[in-house]
Amino acid sequence: MSDEAEDQAPAPPEALVRVQPISDPKAFKRHLLRMFDQGQPLYTDFFDAASEPWKLWDDMVDDFVDDWGFIWTEREGADRTRIALALTFSMPAGTDPAVNEAAVLAMALKAFAGHERVWVAGEHEGPFVKMLVEYRDEDGRAVPSGLADLLRYREAYARELDARGVMAQATTRADRGLGFGEARSAHKARQRLDSEPLTRHRQ
């Protein structure tokens, strides 16, 4: 295979991870209930990570909201009242949803050991798995959720996909040419402007 052919080979699809903190019990309940529109939520017993997840039914949601509740800390800042993190793991359309689910679960069992979690798989413009992770464990330790942690989750997700025969790459916004906080639409508009002929800019 020539170097030119190798340069034209398509890059592996991106393994994307989105993280959203939740501090409001009503918002947490909405996230839980929305899972039933996407599929059957499953709940993993954090006392026995090796056990099979069991099905979560909508009449259990209120109890989950009460049980997770607020875990206060002495530290200042918004994270002292956080209940959970909502994480979404997604791949492009055509990815085997079952493989995607298995990759996310394997990653989650390692990354969130000791935290209660609810997860669900569904289809929304491509295979995705949504997960709610209890923000603090029983000792009050918070789920790591900084920028470096987000990249670590992406890399672990991509590795688990690759281990199951699905090629994926973990990239940052900077890798994709997106500045921090820059909207994708603005980035695309800038790309279109940069690609226009110079004579048009001179008019």
Image (cartoon, rainbow, N blue to C red):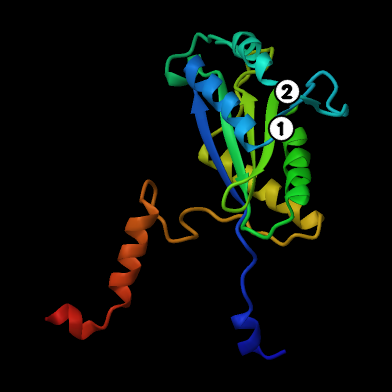
Q: Which one is nearer the viewer's eye here, 43 or 161?
A: 43
Determine the secondary structure under disc 1. Answer: loop
| Alpha carbon distance from label 2 to label 1 | 7 Å
Which residue type does callout 1 highlight?
Answer: Gln
Q: Which one is nearer the viewer's eye here, 77 or 184?
A: 184
What residue is shown at x 36% (from left), y 51% (from top)?
Answer: 183
Q: Which one is nearer the viewer's eye here, 74 or 42?
A: 42
What residue is shown at x 19% (from left), y 81% (from top)?
Answer: 200
Image height of 162 relative to 107, above or below: below
Place of residue 133 in the rendered image (x, y in percent of width and height, measured from the top left): 64, 26
Image height of 49 relative to 2, above or below: above
What residue is shown at x 33% (from left), y 77% (from top)?
Answer: 195
Image marks 2 and 1: residues in contact by CB distance under 8 Å: yes
Residue projecting furthest to the left: 203
Specify few, some or many for label 1: CA neighbours under 10 Å numbering under 14, 14-19, or 20 or more.
some
Which residue type does callout 2 highlight?
Answer: Leu
Give the quadrant of the C terminus. Answer: bottom left
Q: Which one is nearer the viewer's eye here, 80 or 40?
A: 40
Q: Nearer the N terminus, badge 2 or badge 1?
A: 1
Residue 6 visible within the image: yes
Q: Which mark is residue 113?
A: none
Side (left or right) of 15 relative to 75: right
Specify few, some or many for label 2: CA neighbours under 10 Å numbering under 14, 14-19, or 20 or more.
many
Side (left or right) of 86 relative to 116: left
Residue linked to disc 1:
40
Give the quadrant of the N terminus. Answer: bottom right
Place of residue 54 in the rendered image (x, y in percent of width and height, measured from the top left): 81, 25
Image height of 195 relative to 142, above or below: below
Residue linked to disc 2:
56
What residue is shown at x 42% (from left), y 18% (from top)?
Answer: 77
Residue 23 visible within the image: no
Place of residue 179 in the rendered image (x, y in percent of width and height, measured from the top left): 38, 53
